[in-house]
């Protein structure tokens, strides 16, 4: 299952048609899926439906759906808002079939005196078929006012393939956007549904299989693999190996967490608890002498390894060599000691998870990172990514796919770019795969959430998973924990990082 740009989706349509499946068949499949979604929610044949259509293929999808709904006995009005001189071939064909099937059918919006009356009446369902995925420019104030008017009307709002006014690739809004309760999308998810304002205006998204030929995906480089609940449930065994009864703490690996002398200890504590909750056998904490008592009280299960500033280098080497994976960054300050710790870890042949403060240190001087001996994954949020790329945060946020793809390749590192929808880049030699994680909710927007994720990833590494697998499944497990807590807006509002820890499994 993928999310595609508008360009890639058009290619897949053309590829399928080129293999011999007529475009009319794809449209029939799409309309059938749309109609099924509507009748599953509105079984009463007295349901009144307004379908607003433009002059392109999105409007043709609307006409095809109108024909099926009329055939099934629903009360349907179709309103045209396009340019009659620009109607597509598919639109003309669907209109001809519809008028042939129903002699009483009449399309409004063509200048009759009943147009305003039809538009103003109340409807149970309003279906948007104005613009499709090809929209990539502003459409002017008249269309904007019309779409905004539709948004004021009561009734359940359904978008065909993509809400009109939403850029299917970037998630940007073109003057105005139809605010859907449900978007029924065809063939593949569209990347714009997850970026920018996409999630806010798409509502519930239902994906309809219309028969796209799958062999075409192998030639698309910018496809995003979708990580959702089904994907996690179907494949979680790839990261969560069965726990044999004949075992001991060493069986499930050890995580080492590095704490600086001026660190925010709470971040490291959350990471340590998450690592334990995710199943590793032992967590060791490398910290200054002055912090030992705090960690012993907060996490009595952890082994605390104190160090003195005058012997930090030697102590670090011994500590890092004693664990299966090292986590550095949660709560780490950008001071001289922090820089020494990060530089030394990068130079060691160890497995390393890099987060938070350590990323900000790396951003100031990328040379040690580029020349590193450590095998690592990194977990920046958008702000940290902007610092790593020496770019404005708004620029990075608008082109997250481009920045993660380029940075991951240039520095040969697998990584997650954390945001409301996180992107994951996994490198395996010259092969790069991009994943889009849809698990999680706004409850994750709380202090310490990223520290929990870092501890989760490190724990999976310690238990014998590859760095790539640990990164991918750590992100999904973390998001899924928040979804398990999500019983409504109030649950998301009060969620804390410690709640996420307790619900990892």
Image (cartoon, rainbow, N blue to C red):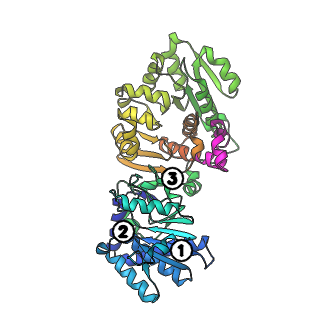
Closer mark to the observer between disc 2 and disc 1: 1
Which residue was labeled with disc 2? 13
Residue at far front of view = 113
Q: Residues within 10 Å of mark 1 (few under 14, many from 20)?
A: many
Query: Horizontal and vertical percent for residue 238?
Result: 55, 50
Residue 502 shown in magenta: yes
Picture layout, residue 25 above or below residue 278: below
Q: How crowded is mark 2: few (under 14 residues within 10 Å), some or many (20 or more)?
A: some
Residue 491 shown in magenta: yes
- Residue found at x 56% / y 40%: 445
Which residue was labeled with disc 1? 49
- Residue found at x 52% / y 51%: 438
Residue 175 in sight in this render:
yes
Whole-number angstrom distance, CA of label 3 to CA of label 2: 27 Å
Query: Horizontal and vertical percent for residue 160?
Result: 46, 67
Residue range highlighted in magenta: 479-505
């Amino acid at each position: 299952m993928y999310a595609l740009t508008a360009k890639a989706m058009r290619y897949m349509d053309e590829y399928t048609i080129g293999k011999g499946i007529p475009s009319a068949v794809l449209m029939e499949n799409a309309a059938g899926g749309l109609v099924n979604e509507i009748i599953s929610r509105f079984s009463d044949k007295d349901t009144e439906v307004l379908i607003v259509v433009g002059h392109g293929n999105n409007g043709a999808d609307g006409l095809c759906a109108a024909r099926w709904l009329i055939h099934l006995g629903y009360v349907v009005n179709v309103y045209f808002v396009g340019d009659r001189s620009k109607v597509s071939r598919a639109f003309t064909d669907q209109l001809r079939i519809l008028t042939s099937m129903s002699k009483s059918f009449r399309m409004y919006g063509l200048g009759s005196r009943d147009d305003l009356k039809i538009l103003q009446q109340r409807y149970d369902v309003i279906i948007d078929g104005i613009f499709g995925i090809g929209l990539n420019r502003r459409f002017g104030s008249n269309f904007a006012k019309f779409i905004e008017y539709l948004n004021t009307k009561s009734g359940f709002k359904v978008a065909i393939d993509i809400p009109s006014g939403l850029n299917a690739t970037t998630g940007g809004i073109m003057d105005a956007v139809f605010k859907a309760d449900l978007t029924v999308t065809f063939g593949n998810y569209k990347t714009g549904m997850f970026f920018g304002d996409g999630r806010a205006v798409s509502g519930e998204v239902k994906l309809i299989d219309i028969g796209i030929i799958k062999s075409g995906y192998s030639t698309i480089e910018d496809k995003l693999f979708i990580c959702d609940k089904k994907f996690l449930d179907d494949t979680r065994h790839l990261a969560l190996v069965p726990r044999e009864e004949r075992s001991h703490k060493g069986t499930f690996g050890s995580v080492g967490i590095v704490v600086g002398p001026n660190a925010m200890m709470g971040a490291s504590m959350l990471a340590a608890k998450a690592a334990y909750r995710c199943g590793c056998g032992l967590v060791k904490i490398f910290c200054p002498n002055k912090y030992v008592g705090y960690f012993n009280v907060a996490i009595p299960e952890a082994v605390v390894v104190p160090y003195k500033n005058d012997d930090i280098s030697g102590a670090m080497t011994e500590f890092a060599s004693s664990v299966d994976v090292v986590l550095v960054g949660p709560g780490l300050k950008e001071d001289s000691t922090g820089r020494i710790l990060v530089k030394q870890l990068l130079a060691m042949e160890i497995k390393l998870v890099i987060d938070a403060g350590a990323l900000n240190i790396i951003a100031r001087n990328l040379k040690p990172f580029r020349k590193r001996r450590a095998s690592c994954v990194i977990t920046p949020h958008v702000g940290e990514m902007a610092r790593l790329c020496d770019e404005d945060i708004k620029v990075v946020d608008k082109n997250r796919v481009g920045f993660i793809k380029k940075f991951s390749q240039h520095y040969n590192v697998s990584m997650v770019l954390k945001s409301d929808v996180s992107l994951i880049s996994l490198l395996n030699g010259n092969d790069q795969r991009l994943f889009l994680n849809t698990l999680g909710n706004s409850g994750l927007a709380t202090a310490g959430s990223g520290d929990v994720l870092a501890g989760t990833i490190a724990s999976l590494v310690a238990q014998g998973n590859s760095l790539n697998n640990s990164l991918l499944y750590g992100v999904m497990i973390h998001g899924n924990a928040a979804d398990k807590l999500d019983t409504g807006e109030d649950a998301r509002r009060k969620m804390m990082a410690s709640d996420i820890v307790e619900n990892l499994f």
